[in-house]
Image (spheres, helix red, strand yellow):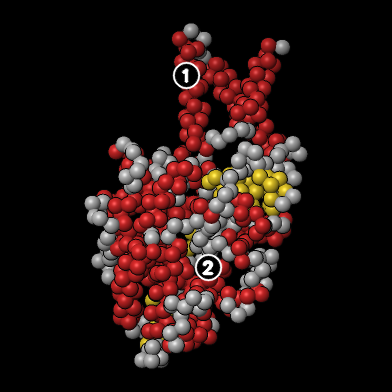
Amino acid sequence: MTYYLHYFVPCFLGVLSHLVYFRNGEHHLYSLLYLKTALISPCVVLIALRVFGAYGSETLVHVLRLQLLYMFSVWLSMLFYRSSRFHRLSQFPGPLLWRLTKFTQSLTNLNMVGMKNLERLHREYGEYVRTGPSEISITDSNSLSKIHGVGSSCIRAPWSDMAVPLKSVFETRVKSLHDKRRRVWDRALSTKCLADYQVRIDMHVNELVSEIRKRDGAPWDASEWFKYFSLDVVGDIGFSESFGMLSGQGNRDVVSILEESQQGLSIIGPLPWMFPILTSLPIVSKPFYRMVDWCYERTKQRQKVDHFSRNLIPAEIESSGKDRDDWLSGDSSIVIAAGSAAVASTLSFGLYHLIRDKSHIDSIRDEILHQEAVESSTTSYLDAFINEILRLYPPNPSGFLRTTPLAGIHIGNRYIPGDTTICMPLWSLHHSERSSVEPLKFEPKRWTTKSDMVIHKEAFIPFGCGSYACIGKKLALMEIRTALIELVKTFDFAFAELQSGESFLERTRDTFTLLAGELPVVATKAVLDAEL
Protein backbone atom coordinates (compact mmCIF):
# COMPACT_ATOMS: atom_id res chain seq x y z
CA MET A 1 0.00 0.00 0.00
CA THR A 2 2.82 2.39 0.91
CA TYR A 3 4.52 1.55 -2.41
CA TYR A 4 1.50 2.64 -4.47
CA LEU A 5 0.96 5.68 -2.25
CA HIS A 6 4.40 6.95 -3.22
CA TYR A 7 3.24 7.12 -6.84
CA PHE A 8 -0.27 8.33 -6.11
CA VAL A 9 0.90 11.45 -4.23
CA PRO A 10 2.88 13.06 -7.13
CA CYS A 11 0.04 12.24 -9.54
CA PHE A 12 -2.50 13.81 -7.21
CA LEU A 13 -0.31 16.88 -6.65
CA GLY A 14 0.17 17.26 -10.41
CA VAL A 15 -3.57 17.31 -11.11
CA LEU A 16 -4.15 19.62 -8.14
CA SER A 17 -1.40 22.00 -9.31
CA HIS A 18 -3.07 22.32 -12.68
CA LEU A 19 -6.61 22.80 -11.41
CA VAL A 20 -5.75 25.22 -8.60
CA TYR A 21 -2.71 27.09 -9.94
CA PHE A 22 -1.72 26.68 -13.60
CA ARG A 23 -5.31 26.84 -14.89
CA ASN A 24 -5.80 30.30 -13.41
CA GLY A 25 -4.01 33.58 -14.11
CA GLU A 26 -0.91 34.28 -16.20
CA HIS A 27 2.33 32.37 -15.79
CA HIS A 28 4.25 33.08 -19.01
CA LEU A 29 6.78 35.41 -17.34
CA TYR A 30 7.78 32.67 -14.87
CA SER A 31 8.54 29.95 -17.42
CA LEU A 32 12.30 30.26 -16.96
CA LEU A 33 11.87 30.00 -13.18
CA TYR A 34 9.72 26.88 -13.60
CA LEU A 35 12.35 25.31 -15.87
CA LYS A 36 15.16 26.05 -13.43
CA THR A 37 13.09 24.67 -10.55
CA ALA A 38 12.40 21.46 -12.48
CA LEU A 39 16.11 21.00 -13.15
CA ILE A 40 17.41 21.99 -9.72
CA SER A 41 14.83 20.44 -7.38
CA PRO A 42 15.95 16.80 -7.90
CA CYS A 43 19.51 17.85 -7.11
CA VAL A 44 18.38 19.60 -3.93
CA VAL A 45 16.44 16.52 -2.83
CA LEU A 46 19.38 14.22 -3.53
CA ILE A 47 21.79 16.46 -1.61
CA ALA A 48 19.41 16.45 1.35
CA LEU A 49 19.12 12.67 1.23
CA ARG A 50 22.88 12.32 1.05
CA VAL A 51 23.26 14.50 4.16
CA PHE A 52 20.91 12.16 6.00
CA GLY A 53 22.69 9.10 4.65
CA ALA A 54 19.87 7.89 2.42
CA TYR A 55 21.54 8.46 -0.95
CA GLY A 56 21.99 5.68 -3.51
CA SER A 57 21.53 4.91 -7.21
CA GLU A 58 18.03 3.58 -6.52
CA THR A 59 17.21 6.80 -4.69
CA LEU A 60 18.21 8.86 -7.74
CA VAL A 61 15.98 6.79 -10.02
CA HIS A 62 13.12 7.00 -7.56
CA VAL A 63 13.34 10.82 -7.22
CA LEU A 64 13.42 11.30 -10.99
CA ARG A 65 10.49 8.93 -11.39
CA LEU A 66 8.41 10.90 -8.88
CA GLN A 67 9.22 14.17 -10.63
CA LEU A 68 8.28 12.76 -14.04
CA LEU A 69 5.02 11.44 -12.61
CA TYR A 70 4.21 14.89 -11.25
CA MET A 71 4.96 16.62 -14.56
CA PHE A 72 3.13 13.97 -16.57
CA SER A 73 0.06 14.40 -14.35
CA VAL A 74 0.10 18.17 -14.87
CA TRP A 75 0.27 17.76 -18.66
CA LEU A 76 -2.34 15.00 -18.74
CA SER A 77 -4.72 17.07 -16.63
CA MET A 78 -4.18 20.04 -18.97
CA LEU A 79 -4.90 18.03 -22.11
CA PHE A 80 -7.98 16.38 -20.64
CA TYR A 81 -9.41 19.69 -19.44
CA ARG A 82 -8.70 21.50 -22.70
CA SER A 83 -10.48 18.83 -24.74
CA SER A 84 -13.40 18.36 -22.34
CA ARG A 85 -16.88 19.88 -22.26
CA PHE A 86 -15.99 21.45 -18.91
CA HIS A 87 -13.62 23.96 -20.50
CA ARG A 88 -14.97 27.51 -20.55
CA LEU A 89 -14.39 27.75 -24.32
CA SER A 90 -15.78 24.34 -25.24
CA GLN A 91 -18.74 25.91 -27.09
CA PHE A 92 -16.45 27.46 -29.70
CA PRO A 93 -15.51 25.24 -32.69
CA GLY A 94 -11.95 24.62 -33.75
CA PRO A 95 -9.52 21.82 -34.69
CA LEU A 96 -8.68 19.50 -31.79
CA LEU A 97 -4.90 19.90 -31.97
CA TRP A 98 -5.21 23.70 -31.90
CA ARG A 99 -7.47 23.47 -28.85
CA LEU A 100 -5.01 21.23 -27.03
CA THR A 101 -1.84 23.27 -27.46
CA LYS A 102 -0.47 26.40 -29.13
CA PHE A 103 2.46 24.30 -30.34
CA THR A 104 0.16 23.32 -33.20
CA GLN A 105 -0.08 26.89 -34.47
CA SER A 106 3.63 27.38 -33.90
CA LEU A 107 4.49 24.37 -36.06
CA THR A 108 1.92 25.34 -38.68
CA ASN A 109 3.54 28.77 -38.93
CA LEU A 110 6.90 27.31 -39.96
CA ASN A 111 5.89 28.18 -43.53
CA MET A 112 5.76 31.88 -42.49
CA VAL A 113 2.21 32.35 -43.78
CA GLY A 114 0.38 32.41 -40.45
CA MET A 115 -2.25 34.82 -41.78
CA LYS A 116 -3.32 32.28 -44.42
CA ASN A 117 -3.44 29.49 -41.83
CA LEU A 118 -5.93 31.52 -39.77
CA GLU A 119 -7.91 32.43 -42.89
CA ARG A 120 -8.25 28.74 -43.73
CA LEU A 121 -9.61 28.00 -40.24
CA HIS A 122 -12.20 30.78 -40.47
CA ARG A 123 -13.42 29.51 -43.82
CA GLU A 124 -13.92 26.09 -42.29
CA TYR A 125 -15.31 26.98 -38.84
CA GLY A 126 -16.85 30.45 -39.22
CA GLU A 127 -16.34 33.83 -37.57
CA TYR A 128 -15.52 32.45 -34.11
CA VAL A 129 -12.78 29.82 -33.99
CA ARG A 130 -11.02 28.40 -30.98
CA THR A 131 -7.33 28.57 -31.90
CA GLY A 132 -5.76 27.68 -28.57
CA PRO A 133 -6.43 26.36 -25.06
CA SER A 134 -7.67 29.81 -24.00
CA GLU A 135 -7.72 31.70 -27.30
CA ILE A 136 -10.42 32.59 -29.82
CA SER A 137 -9.91 34.08 -33.28
CA ILE A 138 -12.76 36.39 -34.33
CA THR A 139 -13.60 37.97 -37.70
CA ASP A 140 -17.00 39.35 -36.71
CA SER A 141 -16.87 43.10 -37.51
CA ASN A 142 -19.61 43.71 -34.93
CA SER A 143 -17.12 42.79 -32.20
CA LEU A 144 -14.65 45.57 -33.04
CA SER A 145 -15.87 48.12 -30.51
CA LYS A 146 -16.00 45.53 -27.72
CA ILE A 147 -12.47 44.28 -28.39
CA HIS A 148 -10.55 47.23 -29.84
CA GLY A 149 -12.79 50.24 -29.21
CA VAL A 150 -11.78 53.23 -27.09
CA GLY A 151 -14.04 52.13 -24.25
CA SER A 152 -13.10 48.45 -24.46
CA SER A 153 -12.32 46.70 -21.19
CA CYS A 154 -9.93 44.32 -22.97
CA ILE A 155 -6.20 44.77 -22.48
CA ARG A 156 -3.18 43.66 -24.43
CA ALA A 157 -2.52 39.94 -24.23
CA PRO A 158 0.56 38.19 -22.74
CA TRP A 159 2.12 38.28 -26.21
CA SER A 160 2.95 41.94 -25.54
CA ASP A 161 5.35 40.88 -22.77
CA MET A 162 7.68 39.27 -25.29
CA ALA A 163 10.41 41.93 -24.92
CA VAL A 164 10.48 42.05 -21.10
CA PRO A 165 12.48 43.60 -19.45
CA LEU A 166 12.50 46.10 -22.34
CA LYS A 167 9.55 48.48 -22.33
CA SER A 168 7.76 50.42 -25.04
CA VAL A 169 4.45 52.14 -25.63
CA PHE A 170 3.59 49.37 -28.10
CA GLU A 171 3.99 46.62 -25.49
CA THR A 172 2.66 48.39 -22.38
CA ARG A 173 -0.28 46.40 -20.99
CA VAL A 174 -1.23 48.77 -18.15
CA LYS A 175 -3.72 51.20 -19.70
CA SER A 176 -2.90 54.15 -17.45
CA LEU A 177 0.82 53.90 -18.22
CA HIS A 178 0.12 53.37 -21.92
CA ASP A 179 -2.08 56.48 -22.06
CA LYS A 180 0.60 58.51 -20.29
CA ARG A 181 3.31 57.53 -22.72
CA ARG A 182 1.04 57.80 -25.74
CA ARG A 183 0.37 61.45 -24.96
CA VAL A 184 4.09 62.09 -25.33
CA TRP A 185 4.16 60.32 -28.69
CA ASP A 186 1.07 62.24 -29.80
CA ARG A 187 2.95 65.50 -29.24
CA ALA A 188 5.85 64.23 -31.35
CA LEU A 189 3.40 63.34 -34.13
CA SER A 190 1.15 66.40 -33.93
CA THR A 191 -0.10 68.20 -37.05
CA LYS A 192 2.60 70.86 -36.64
CA CYS A 193 5.35 68.25 -36.34
CA LEU A 194 4.03 66.32 -39.34
CA ALA A 195 4.27 69.48 -41.46
CA ASP A 196 7.93 69.78 -40.45
CA TYR A 197 8.55 66.11 -41.26
CA GLN A 198 7.17 66.56 -44.80
CA VAL A 199 10.33 68.43 -45.80
CA ARG A 200 12.48 65.53 -44.63
CA ILE A 201 10.27 62.99 -46.41
CA ASP A 202 10.52 64.98 -49.66
CA MET A 203 14.30 64.95 -49.39
CA HIS A 204 14.47 61.16 -49.10
CA VAL A 205 11.88 60.62 -51.84
CA ASN A 206 14.06 62.72 -54.16
CA GLU A 207 17.05 60.62 -53.15
CA LEU A 208 15.10 57.44 -53.94
CA VAL A 209 14.13 58.81 -57.36
CA SER A 210 17.75 59.75 -58.02
CA GLU A 211 18.97 56.24 -57.15
CA ILE A 212 16.35 54.66 -59.43
CA ARG A 213 17.44 56.92 -62.30
CA LYS A 214 20.98 55.59 -61.90
CA ARG A 215 19.72 52.09 -62.72
CA ASP A 216 18.89 53.39 -66.23
CA GLY A 217 16.58 50.54 -67.21
CA ALA A 218 18.52 47.85 -65.36
CA PRO A 219 16.62 45.48 -63.02
CA TRP A 220 16.47 46.38 -59.32
CA ASP A 221 14.66 44.88 -56.34
CA ALA A 222 11.95 47.40 -55.48
CA SER A 223 11.14 45.73 -52.16
CA GLU A 224 14.73 46.09 -50.98
CA TRP A 225 15.02 49.72 -52.04
CA PHE A 226 11.74 50.65 -50.38
CA LYS A 227 13.18 49.22 -47.16
CA TYR A 228 16.22 51.47 -47.56
CA PHE A 229 13.96 54.46 -48.15
CA SER A 230 11.72 53.84 -45.15
CA LEU A 231 14.69 53.26 -42.84
CA ASP A 232 16.31 56.51 -43.94
CA VAL A 233 13.09 58.41 -43.22
CA VAL A 234 12.77 56.78 -39.79
CA GLY A 235 16.38 57.62 -39.03
CA ASP A 236 15.99 61.24 -40.08
CA ILE A 237 12.69 61.85 -38.28
CA GLY A 238 13.18 59.63 -35.27
CA PHE A 239 16.89 60.06 -34.64
CA SER A 240 17.82 63.25 -36.49
CA GLU A 241 20.14 61.46 -38.89
CA SER A 242 19.64 59.46 -42.05
CA PHE A 243 20.83 55.87 -41.73
CA GLY A 244 22.48 56.20 -45.16
CA MET A 245 20.72 53.20 -46.67
CA LEU A 246 19.83 54.75 -50.03
CA SER A 247 23.26 56.28 -50.52
CA GLY A 248 25.03 53.11 -49.43
CA GLN A 249 27.01 54.96 -46.78
CA GLY A 250 25.18 53.18 -43.97
CA ASN A 251 25.25 49.53 -42.97
CA ARG A 252 22.69 47.83 -45.21
CA ASP A 253 23.04 44.65 -43.18
CA VAL A 254 20.61 46.36 -40.81
CA VAL A 255 17.78 45.24 -43.09
CA SER A 256 18.65 41.57 -42.57
CA ILE A 257 19.19 42.19 -38.84
CA LEU A 258 15.67 43.59 -38.50
CA GLU A 259 14.13 40.80 -40.56
CA GLU A 260 15.97 38.04 -38.69
CA SER A 261 14.80 39.44 -35.36
CA GLN A 262 11.18 39.34 -36.54
CA GLN A 263 11.09 36.03 -38.37
CA GLY A 264 10.93 34.07 -35.14
CA LEU A 265 7.82 35.98 -34.03
CA SER A 266 5.63 34.08 -36.46
CA ILE A 267 6.80 30.76 -34.98
CA ILE A 268 7.37 31.59 -31.31
CA GLY A 269 4.65 34.26 -31.12
CA PRO A 270 1.89 31.76 -30.24
CA LEU A 271 4.00 30.64 -27.25
CA PRO A 272 4.71 33.75 -25.14
CA TRP A 273 6.01 31.60 -22.29
CA MET A 274 8.89 30.56 -24.57
CA PHE A 275 10.32 34.09 -24.80
CA PRO A 276 11.91 34.20 -21.30
CA ILE A 277 13.55 30.83 -21.96
CA LEU A 278 14.78 31.54 -25.48
CA THR A 279 16.06 35.04 -24.70
CA SER A 280 18.21 33.51 -21.95
CA LEU A 281 20.01 31.39 -24.57
CA PRO A 282 22.75 33.48 -26.25
CA ILE A 283 22.74 31.58 -29.55
CA VAL A 284 18.97 31.65 -30.01
CA SER A 285 18.48 35.25 -28.86
CA LYS A 286 21.41 36.70 -30.81
CA PRO A 287 19.32 38.12 -33.74
CA PHE A 288 16.91 39.80 -31.33
CA TYR A 289 19.60 41.44 -29.23
CA ARG A 290 21.58 42.48 -32.31
CA MET A 291 18.55 44.48 -33.38
CA VAL A 292 17.95 45.91 -29.91
CA ASP A 293 21.61 46.88 -29.48
CA TRP A 294 21.74 48.58 -32.88
CA CYS A 295 18.56 50.56 -32.16
CA TYR A 296 19.81 51.50 -28.70
CA GLU A 297 23.12 52.79 -30.05
CA ARG A 298 21.35 54.94 -32.65
CA THR A 299 19.27 56.49 -29.89
CA LYS A 300 22.18 57.11 -27.53
CA GLN A 301 24.08 58.90 -30.28
CA ARG A 302 21.25 61.38 -30.78
CA GLN A 303 19.71 61.42 -27.32
CA LYS A 304 20.75 65.01 -26.65
CA VAL A 305 19.43 66.37 -29.94
CA ASP A 306 16.26 68.42 -29.42
CA HIS A 307 14.07 66.37 -31.74
CA PHE A 308 11.81 63.34 -31.84
CA SER A 309 14.38 61.14 -30.08
CA ARG A 310 14.24 63.41 -27.03
CA ASN A 311 10.59 62.42 -26.63
CA LEU A 312 11.27 58.69 -26.46
CA ILE A 313 11.72 58.98 -22.70
CA PRO A 314 9.06 61.28 -21.24
CA ALA A 315 10.01 63.51 -18.35
CA GLU A 316 6.70 62.70 -16.64
CA ILE A 317 7.85 59.16 -15.85
CA GLU A 318 10.20 59.02 -12.89
CA SER A 319 12.56 56.12 -13.30
CA SER A 320 16.01 54.88 -12.45
CA GLY A 321 18.81 54.73 -14.97
CA LYS A 322 18.23 51.03 -15.73
CA ASP A 323 14.48 51.52 -16.08
CA ARG A 324 15.10 54.49 -18.34
CA ASP A 325 17.42 52.45 -20.55
CA ASP A 326 14.79 49.71 -20.83
CA TRP A 327 12.27 52.28 -22.10
CA LEU A 328 14.87 53.76 -24.43
CA SER A 329 15.77 50.39 -25.96
CA GLY A 330 12.16 49.29 -26.29
CA ASP A 331 10.82 52.50 -27.80
CA SER A 332 13.72 52.92 -30.21
CA SER A 333 13.27 49.34 -31.46
CA ILE A 334 9.59 49.99 -32.15
CA VAL A 335 10.31 53.30 -33.91
CA ILE A 336 12.73 51.58 -36.30
CA ALA A 337 11.07 48.19 -36.85
CA ALA A 338 7.40 49.19 -36.97
CA GLY A 339 8.08 52.61 -38.45
CA SER A 340 9.79 51.19 -41.53
CA ALA A 341 8.06 47.86 -42.18
CA ALA A 342 4.56 49.14 -42.94
CA VAL A 343 5.78 51.80 -45.38
CA ALA A 344 8.14 49.47 -47.23
CA SER A 345 5.61 46.65 -47.67
CA THR A 346 2.78 48.99 -48.74
CA LEU A 347 4.99 50.63 -51.37
CA SER A 348 6.05 47.20 -52.66
CA PHE A 349 2.49 45.93 -53.03
CA GLY A 350 1.46 49.29 -54.49
CA LEU A 351 4.12 49.11 -57.20
CA TYR A 352 3.14 45.51 -57.94
CA HIS A 353 -0.43 46.56 -58.72
CA LEU A 354 0.68 49.65 -60.67
CA ILE A 355 2.66 47.36 -62.97
CA ARG A 356 0.02 44.66 -63.16
CA ASP A 357 -2.73 47.05 -64.25
CA LYS A 358 -1.55 50.18 -66.06
CA SER A 359 -4.96 51.84 -65.63
CA HIS A 360 -4.08 52.61 -61.99
CA ILE A 361 -0.98 54.58 -62.89
CA ASP A 362 -2.92 56.41 -65.62
CA SER A 363 -5.68 57.38 -63.16
CA ILE A 364 -3.20 58.66 -60.59
CA ARG A 365 -1.27 60.61 -63.22
CA ASP A 366 -4.44 62.17 -64.56
CA GLU A 367 -5.40 63.18 -61.03
CA ILE A 368 -2.00 64.76 -60.40
CA LEU A 369 -2.07 66.51 -63.77
CA HIS A 370 -5.36 68.20 -62.93
CA GLN A 371 -4.21 68.95 -59.38
CA GLU A 372 -7.13 67.13 -57.80
CA ALA A 373 -5.27 64.80 -55.50
CA VAL A 374 -3.25 65.85 -52.57
CA GLU A 375 -5.28 68.53 -50.78
CA SER A 376 -8.76 67.47 -51.86
CA SER A 377 -11.36 67.08 -49.11
CA THR A 378 -12.88 64.13 -50.98
CA THR A 379 -11.15 60.78 -51.33
CA SER A 380 -8.74 60.94 -54.27
CA TYR A 381 -7.96 57.98 -56.49
CA LEU A 382 -4.49 57.88 -54.95
CA ASP A 383 -5.97 57.61 -51.45
CA ALA A 384 -8.39 54.95 -52.68
CA PHE A 385 -5.49 53.06 -54.26
CA ILE A 386 -3.54 53.16 -50.98
CA ASN A 387 -6.62 52.07 -49.00
CA GLU A 388 -7.08 49.10 -51.29
CA ILE A 389 -3.44 48.09 -50.85
CA LEU A 390 -3.83 48.29 -47.07
CA ARG A 391 -7.09 46.33 -47.23
CA LEU A 392 -5.62 43.44 -49.19
CA TYR A 393 -2.20 43.54 -47.53
CA PRO A 394 -2.55 44.86 -43.95
CA PRO A 395 0.86 45.63 -42.36
CA ASN A 396 0.08 43.33 -39.39
CA PRO A 397 -1.86 40.53 -41.11
CA SER A 398 -2.39 38.28 -38.09
CA GLY A 399 -3.70 41.18 -36.02
CA PHE A 400 -3.18 42.11 -32.40
CA LEU A 401 -4.08 40.01 -29.36
CA ARG A 402 -6.29 41.15 -26.50
CA THR A 403 -7.28 39.60 -23.17
CA THR A 404 -10.83 39.84 -21.85
CA PRO A 405 -11.48 41.13 -18.30
CA LEU A 406 -12.26 38.60 -15.57
CA ALA A 407 -15.99 39.33 -15.92
CA GLY A 408 -15.86 38.47 -19.62
CA ILE A 409 -17.56 40.40 -22.43
CA HIS A 410 -20.77 40.03 -24.44
CA ILE A 411 -20.74 40.35 -28.23
CA GLY A 412 -24.34 40.26 -29.38
CA ASN A 413 -25.77 37.07 -27.93
CA ARG A 414 -22.34 35.51 -27.46
CA TYR A 415 -20.47 35.50 -24.18
CA ILE A 416 -16.65 35.46 -24.18
CA PRO A 417 -15.41 34.25 -20.76
CA GLY A 418 -12.89 36.21 -18.73
CA ASP A 419 -9.13 35.81 -19.13
CA THR A 420 -9.59 34.71 -22.75
CA THR A 421 -7.11 35.75 -25.41
CA ILE A 422 -8.81 37.18 -28.49
CA CYS A 423 -7.18 37.36 -31.88
CA MET A 424 -8.70 39.42 -34.69
CA PRO A 425 -6.64 38.59 -37.82
CA LEU A 426 -6.79 41.60 -40.12
CA TRP A 427 -5.96 39.49 -43.18
CA SER A 428 -9.07 37.37 -42.64
CA LEU A 429 -11.22 40.34 -41.56
CA HIS A 430 -10.32 42.37 -44.64
CA HIS A 431 -10.73 39.38 -46.98
CA SER A 432 -14.10 38.37 -45.58
CA GLU A 433 -17.18 38.45 -47.82
CA ARG A 434 -19.04 39.87 -44.83
CA SER A 435 -16.80 42.96 -44.98
CA SER A 436 -16.56 43.56 -48.73
CA VAL A 437 -18.07 42.51 -52.04
CA GLU A 438 -15.54 40.49 -54.05
CA PRO A 439 -13.02 40.87 -51.22
CA LEU A 440 -10.10 39.29 -53.11
CA LYS A 441 -10.47 41.65 -56.08
CA PHE A 442 -8.20 44.69 -56.21
CA GLU A 443 -10.65 47.54 -56.81
CA PRO A 444 -9.70 51.04 -55.57
CA LYS A 445 -13.06 52.41 -56.72
CA ARG A 446 -14.75 50.59 -53.84
CA TRP A 447 -13.52 53.58 -51.80
CA THR A 448 -14.93 56.17 -54.24
CA THR A 449 -17.63 55.60 -56.87
CA LYS A 450 -18.34 51.95 -56.00
CA SER A 451 -18.93 52.39 -52.28
CA ASP A 452 -21.57 49.64 -52.34
CA MET A 453 -18.66 47.18 -52.54
CA VAL A 454 -17.79 48.02 -48.93
CA ILE A 455 -20.26 46.28 -46.61
CA HIS A 456 -18.68 47.13 -43.25
CA LYS A 457 -16.36 50.13 -43.53
CA GLU A 458 -15.58 49.88 -39.81
CA ALA A 459 -13.92 46.52 -40.53
CA PHE A 460 -11.16 48.32 -42.43
CA ILE A 461 -8.53 48.82 -39.71
CA PRO A 462 -5.05 48.35 -41.26
CA PHE A 463 -3.48 50.42 -38.47
CA GLY A 464 -5.72 49.12 -35.69
CA CYS A 465 -8.33 51.18 -33.88
CA GLY A 466 -9.21 52.49 -30.45
CA SER A 467 -6.76 53.58 -27.79
CA TYR A 468 -4.12 51.11 -29.02
CA ALA A 469 -4.28 52.23 -32.68
CA CYS A 470 -0.98 52.84 -34.47
CA ILE A 471 0.47 56.17 -33.38
CA GLY A 472 2.43 56.64 -36.60
CA LYS A 473 -0.48 56.11 -39.01
CA LYS A 474 -0.53 59.68 -40.38
CA LEU A 475 3.24 59.75 -40.77
CA ALA A 476 3.25 56.41 -42.60
CA LEU A 477 0.52 57.56 -44.99
CA MET A 478 2.46 60.77 -45.67
CA GLU A 479 5.51 58.74 -46.67
CA ILE A 480 3.51 56.36 -48.85
CA ARG A 481 1.58 59.10 -50.67
CA THR A 482 4.64 61.29 -51.24
CA ALA A 483 6.71 58.39 -52.59
CA LEU A 484 3.95 57.07 -54.88
CA ILE A 485 3.25 60.52 -56.35
CA GLU A 486 6.89 61.07 -57.30
CA LEU A 487 7.37 57.54 -58.62
CA VAL A 488 4.24 57.75 -60.78
CA LYS A 489 5.21 61.20 -62.08
CA THR A 490 8.75 60.18 -62.94
CA PHE A 491 8.81 56.57 -64.14
CA ASP A 492 7.14 53.85 -66.13
CA PHE A 493 7.60 50.44 -64.52
CA ALA A 494 7.65 46.84 -65.73
CA PHE A 495 8.45 43.47 -64.18
CA ALA A 496 12.06 42.49 -64.83
CA GLU A 497 10.93 38.92 -65.51
CA LEU A 498 7.66 37.42 -66.68
CA GLN A 499 7.38 35.45 -63.44
CA SER A 500 8.15 38.40 -61.17
CA GLY A 501 4.53 39.16 -60.32
CA GLU A 502 3.46 35.65 -59.32
CA SER A 503 6.64 34.82 -57.40
CA PHE A 504 6.44 38.16 -55.57
CA LEU A 505 3.15 37.22 -53.92
CA GLU A 506 4.32 33.66 -53.26
CA ARG A 507 7.37 34.96 -51.38
CA THR A 508 5.33 37.25 -49.13
CA ARG A 509 5.74 36.26 -45.47
CA ASP A 510 3.99 36.93 -42.18
CA THR A 511 6.68 37.80 -39.64
CA PHE A 512 4.25 39.69 -37.39
CA THR A 513 4.63 42.50 -39.94
CA LEU A 514 3.92 41.61 -43.56
CA LEU A 515 7.22 41.07 -45.34
CA ALA A 516 7.01 41.61 -49.11
CA GLY A 517 8.91 39.24 -51.36
CA GLU A 518 11.54 40.21 -53.88
CA LEU A 519 10.17 42.43 -56.64
CA PRO A 520 12.63 42.75 -59.57
CA VAL A 521 11.46 45.63 -61.75
CA VAL A 522 12.71 47.90 -64.51
CA ALA A 523 12.09 51.65 -64.41
CA THR A 524 12.24 53.95 -67.43
CA LYS A 525 11.49 57.64 -67.83
CA ALA A 526 7.75 58.25 -67.85
CA VAL A 527 6.24 59.25 -71.17
CA LEU A 528 4.28 62.03 -69.42
CA ASP A 529 7.21 63.18 -67.30
CA ALA A 530 7.46 66.51 -69.10
CA GLU A 531 3.75 67.27 -68.69
CA LEU A 532 3.66 66.41 -65.00
- The residue depicted at 52 percent of the width and 40 percent of the height is 273
- Please determine whether, in this image, residue 150 is positioned above or below residue 347: above
- Please determine whether, in this image, residue 78 is positioned above or below residue 516: above
Q: Position of residue 86 (x, y in %)?
A: 74, 36
Amino acid carrying mark 2 in the image:
Leu
Q: Left or right: 489 with respect to 416? A: left
Q: Earlier in the sequence, mark 2 or mark 1?
A: 1
Looking at this view, is 420 or 37 the one in front?
420
Looking at this view, is 390 or 12 the one in front?
390
Q: Which mark is residue 473?
A: none
Q: According to the image, label 1 marks what residue?
A: 44
Q: Is residue 291 visible?
A: no
Q: Position of residue 509 (x, y in %)?
A: 51, 62
Q: Position of residue 331 (x, y in %)?
A: 37, 50
Quarter occupied by residue 256: bottom left
- Please determine whether, in this image, residue 421 is positioned above or below residue 192: above
Quarter occupied by residue 523: bottom left
SS class of the residue under badge 2?
A: helix
- The residue depicted at 64 percent of the width and 71 percent of the height is 454
Amino acid carrying mark 1 in the image:
Val
Q: According to the image, label 2 marks what residue?
A: 390
The total number of labels drawn is: 2
SS class of the residue under badge 1?
A: helix
**Placement of the N terminus among the 4 image quadrants:** top right
